[in-house]
Image: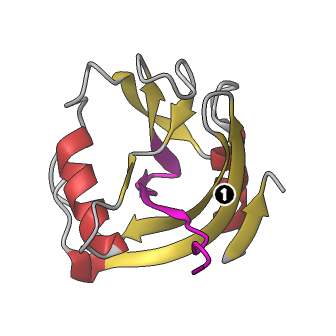
Amino acid sequence: MKKQRFKLTPASYLVLIKNSEVLLLRRYNTGYNDGNYSLVAGHLDGQETFRQAMVREAKEEAGVNLNPNDLDIVHVMHRQENFSDVGRRERIDIFIRPRKWRGKPQNLEPEKCDDVNWFPLNSLPKNTIPYIKQVLEHIHNKVFYSEFGF
């Protein structure tokens, strides 16, 4: 009998920084961390790279246009969470910072998000998701890899 291989859920996160402020969105009506701030992000659809997924998600969620050649991977996180309905899940999160972008960020998914705003990196909202706070600190300190929830 062949053993089932372990699987990770991959996701890309947009670290959009302007004038020492980071773009955050407040999750709404998703069933996951609703009412808390996160970064623009999304799971890979398959047959796409982390950079390609980030280009797609930035456009879909915030109307930001990115070029994959202008994207730098600034942090990698191996993370686990326990969910009441499905149990423990492990994830690999890639945090990507664009050197440039086009468009004014806006909320293009009001059914999943009720606020999109810039916040000072040194004064994030109290209701920022903990692993997002940790990642932003690591990026500031030039730490490339971390683990969360183990």
Residue topped by disc 1? 135
Say if the magenta span includes residue 63.
no
- Which residue corresponds to the image point at 36% horizontal and 71% vertical from the top-left? 50
- Which residue corresponds to the image point at 64% horizontal and 36% vertical from the top-left? 129
**Residue 44 vertical position relative to residue 19 in the rendered view, above or below:** below
- Location of residue 65 in the rendering, given as x and y in whole percent from the top left corner: 16, 57
Q: Is residue 100 shown left or right of residue 36?
A: left
Q: Quadrant of residue 123?
A: top right
Farthest residue in the right direction? 150
Magenta span covers which residues?
1-23
- Location of residue 42 in the rendering, given as x and y in whole percent from the top left corner: 37, 51
Q: Name the element at disc 1.
A: helix
Say if the magenta span includes residue 18.
yes
- Location of residue 58 in the rendering, given as x and y in whole percent from the top left corner: 26, 51
The number of discs equals 1
* Three-letter amino acid code at the position of disc 1: Val
**Residue 88 vertical position relative to residue 138 in the rendered view, above or below:** above
